[in-house]
Amino acid sequence: MAAQKAYIETDRQVQSILEDVRSGIFKCVYLLMGEEPYYPEMVCNAIIENCLQDWEKDFNETICFGADVTAETVITAARRFPMMADRQLVVVKEAQQMKGLEDLAVYCQQPLESTVLVLLMHGASADKRKALYKSVLKTGVVVDSPALRDYEMPQWISAYYESRGLKIHPEAAQLLAESAGTDLGKIAVETDKLLKNLPEGVKEIGVADIEKNVGISRQWSVFELTKCLSYRQAAQALKVAAYIGQTPRFVLPMVVAPLFTHFSRILKYHALLPTRPGPADAARVLGVNPYFLKEYDAAVRNYSLQQAMAAVSVLTEYDYKGKGGDAGEASQPELFTELVTKLLNI
């Protein structure tokens, strides 16, 4: 839940920054960093779009990449005064690739008020113990965007849709999360595409909308497979597994991970049931929407504690095989079918 809390704080911070930027309010230095690039890139793009008028950009906008510049070059550019404009903009993308990045701390301690300096780190972070991070924290803005775990994505999607005045059904959020993984940018792109194709006035997104507009079918997804396993629907589970195994670029570890998460939740639910938790508490501990608790009620009936532990052990074994360990002559799709068969027969 710590990552989820950090996300909420980051989202609020970014929305506040975007509001300021669109109103013409800028800080002297922005350090945009973190494992998840969605928010840092959003802020960077908004600053580039709003900082200068088009006619001011020729003489007052410098956009470069960390691998191509030195700290000295960036400091020299940042210390120039704007020409026929109130401010100038200096953006360093992929700043983590700059040699001597920490040397920028000297400038960031006393930045020029007429310069907006943006340091955009892609999937990386500055060392919080060192001078650059500390100086920007005092004189500018630091956006630190944490990566979300796969089980946190449906909740993020629901919150994201709510921020756009929409409601998304929990199964639809789960399906979209399965399609996009933890790529927030991809979810934003798919959402924009979805909204363009929806009839005017639609405010609630269902599974059918995701299937039609995003191009992923619930019937043939890992999401559906875990549901079949929970209810021990053997024929359908094997059918879904066979389809998934034949998809382009299929690799076994890609599907073992969500299955491992699923059976780990079953174990957690077994441990939780003696305390008689309410639906909200149970959903919070499992990291799922309360809507899905009925599936986990079925799963704990169909898999005893010992069986769930055995399932986790089998998944660990096949994760090893899928990564090249002791797999013999079997192909990845064959191993997957074998795995699902074992999970059904535990």
Image (cartoon, rainbow, N blue to C red):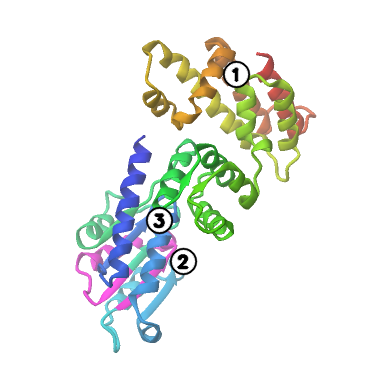
Where residue 199 sits, quadrant-wise, is bottom right
Residue 110: image location, x then y, percent? 19, 68
Q: Residue at x 44, y 42 (%)?
A: 148
Choose mark 1 or mark 2, whichever is in front. 1
Residue corresponding to mark 2: 67
Q: Using residue 250 as the reference point, say whether residue 302 is left or right of it.
A: left
Extent of the magenta region: 88-117
Quarter containing the C terminus: top right
Magenta stretch: includes residue 42: no
Magenta stretch: includes residue 103: yes
Q: Which mark is residue 311?
A: 1
Q: Residue furthest right?
A: 329
Q: Residue at x 20, y 64 (%)?
A: 109
Looking at the rendered structure, the kind of residue marked 1 is: Ala
Residue corresponding to mark 3: 39
Which comes sooner in the sequence, label 3 or label 2? 3
Report how far apart the C-alphas of labels 3 and 1 lie in the structure: 37 Å
Total marks drawn? 3
Looking at the rendered structure, the kind of residue marked 2 is: Ala
Which comes sooner in the sequence, label 3 or label 1? 3
Looking at the rendered structure, the kind of residue marked 3 is: Tyr
